[in-house]
Amino acid sequence: MKYNKLLIIGIIALVAVISVGSVSAGWFDFLGGNSTDTSLDGQEVNLAAAASLKNVYDEKLIPMFQEKYPGVKVTPTYASSGDLQTQIENGLKADVFMSAANKQMNALANKSLVDNKTNVQFLENKVVLIVPKDSTANITSFNDLKNVSGNIAIGDPESVPAGQYAQEVLNNTGIWDDVQSKLSLGTDVTAVLNQVSQGSAECGIVYSTDAKSDSNVKVVCEAPDSALKTPVIYPVAVLKNAEHPDAAKQFVEFLQTKEAKDVFVEYGFSIHE
């Protein structure tokens, strides 16, 4: 009898320890602890992302994801969305694509290169007119670009979504023909930002998130809705030929968590509802 009582007490104690351990682990996860899921260990997520996403990914989101999944490596490639589209079509090793416009994502989807079940209309951005922070130029609106004597930096409309949005604004304000000879075309939006920041261009058209990231420029105005009828949407999706689709899907799911969305908002993006 005595032995049986001791055995029962021992079993009860063991169950209590296991229960406390489970609750503690649950609270640890709830409070943002590292994932205990090791099923993705050894996998890699090759991320192809628009240049305007470089800061938020490198500074915050990639480290956050790798802290949760320390066994997964995230390797980013940044360029204009058009260049990335072309590279993916030509065999770029990429698992996740995040574009600064639907045009490039749709082109890949039409070629069956996107896992459409994972394709999300995710972020929004704004298009703004910027000048160097110490500029004394009399530029207060897009219409004033007709009187600019120096270079006006925009992304190349052939491949850069920011340049395509800029062209739309300039067309809809009726000044495209007036400014075309003054345009200095950048290979991506970061190149446009650098031209203005370094003073080689008198002004430029970029995303508001880019302007926010550089203290050497200031925003003159935001593109009015009447001039920019195409919303600046950032879609994200896993690619069909992803080498590690499980890790890629987990990465895209992570981007849609509240903690990740809060970081995007911190960097000036809006969440597309």
Image: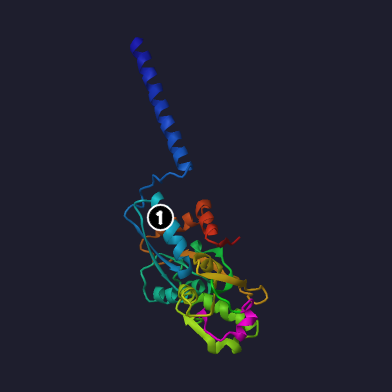
Q: Nearer the viewer, residue 56 or 256?
A: 56
Residue 129 appears at what percent x and percent y? 58, 74
Q: Is residue 210 magenta?
A: no
What range is drawn magenta here? 138-155
Where, quadrant-wise, is the C terminus in this rendering? Answer: bottom right
Which residue carries the number 1 mark? 63
Up-down: is 136 above or below 272? Answer: below
Q: How many marks?
A: 1
Furthest-left residue in this view: 42
Residue 66 appears at what percent x and percent y? 39, 53
Going by the numbered disc 1, the residue's amino acid type is: Pro
Residue 7 appears at what percent x and percent y? 35, 17
Q: Nearer the viewer, residue 208 or 78?
A: 208
Where, quadrant-wise, is the N terminus in this rendering? Answer: top left
Furthest-top residue in this view: 1
Up-down: is 130 above or below 58? Answer: below
Q: Nearer the viewer, residue 238 or 168?
A: 168
Q: Is residue 145 magenta?
A: yes
- Residue 54 occupies which quadrant of the picture? bottom left
Which residue is found at the position 55% from the left and 88% from the top?
A: 180
Kind of element beneath mark 1: helix
Q: Residues within 10 Å of mark 1 (few under 14, many from 20)?
A: some
Specify how the rendered protein is coloured.
rainbow
Residue 268 appears at what percent x and percent y? 55, 62
